[in-house]
Amino acid sequence: MSDFSSKCREYLTDTGETVYQLASSSGLDRTSLQRMLTGKRLPSIDFIHQFCDSIRINPSQRLELMELYKIEKIGKEVYYNRKYIQELLRVISSQQTISPSGFQRLPSLPFYRGDFSFDVEKKVFSLFEDILDSGSDEEICTNIPANCRLLVQTFARLYPEYGKLPPVIQILPLHQNPTASPDYNMNLETFLCTILPILSGFLNYQPYYYYTQAGRDVSSYTLFPFFFITKKKLLLLSYDMMTFVFT
């Protein structure tokens, strides 16, 4: 049974009516209604609107049900890919990201997320700051996930003060067959999260991609899977980004 049909059954149960009673009072075809509730058949959009009107759900519930209907109709991968693209176009069209001041907005964009400790944040910040203070053009290489807020938050804090950032190489996995993975949005999310720093004016940012059969969760099996490397320093971060090892 799909999420859509389960939600339909939940809303019908809340009304206290049976399938037969709802069909009699609303004029909905009882067979079509039964098939929708058991996940055997996806009805037309007009049928869904009539169903929503008949059970008198509120606007937020109707919106949730319509979203589930769209996901069921076109598939989760296509649906969420379209949502990402729509959000990216919305951000770009605002013309607030495509400028150096766009660094300030990056951490607040919905593409970036993740928690990390204050100690980890402070250590990553100092790694970047030391290079800027020395006037060196030393590169920082990292495999931090593309959607992690830690990197763009560091950009946002440093750029207003220094007017530049150290060269950064970010090494990122792409799934060979995303449709066969629970992490089906991984590739698109990776591309979007690496496009935005470039659009914000970060010319020294170079994302590199490699293909893998495993998703991002493979990193959870490593004690300190994420790294920041310079010519002289190595910073390793734990999977939950709460602790680090530095040398």
Image: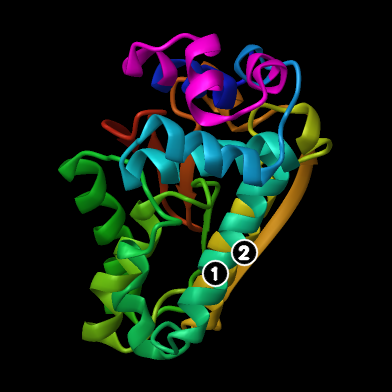
Residue 104 within the segment the image draws in magenta: no
Q: Position of residue 48 (x, y in %)?
A: 58, 38
Q: Is residue 27 left or right of residue 136?
A: right
The answer to if 34 sits in the magenta stretch is yes
Asked which secondary structure carries label 1, the reply is: helix
The quadrant the C terminus occupies is: top left
Callout 1, which amino acid?
Answer: Leu
The residue to which callout 2 is attached is: 85
Give residue 114's position: percent from left, percent from top. Answer: 35, 42
Nearest to the observer: residue 44 or residue 123: 44
Mark 2 residue type: Ile
Quarter of the figure that contains the N terminus: top right
Residue at (42, 82) in percent of width and height: 97
Is residue 174 visible to us here?
Answer: no
Which quarter of the figure has residue 60? top left
User: What span is in magenta?
Assistant: 12-35
Examine the image and state in which quarter residue 30 appears.
top right
Judge whether 123 appears above or below 51 on screen: below
- The span from disc 1 to disc 2 (Cα, nearest Å) is 5 Å
Q: Is residue 62 left or right of residue 72?
A: left
Residue of label 1: 88
- Categorize mark 2 by other alpha carbons within 10 Å: few (<14), some (14-19), many (20+): some
The answer to whether residue 24 is seen in the rendering is: yes
Which residue is drawn at the image coordinates 43% and 46% (left, top)? Answer: 63
Judge by depth and name the residue closer to the eye, 123 or 176: 176
Residue 79 % position (x, y): 65, 47
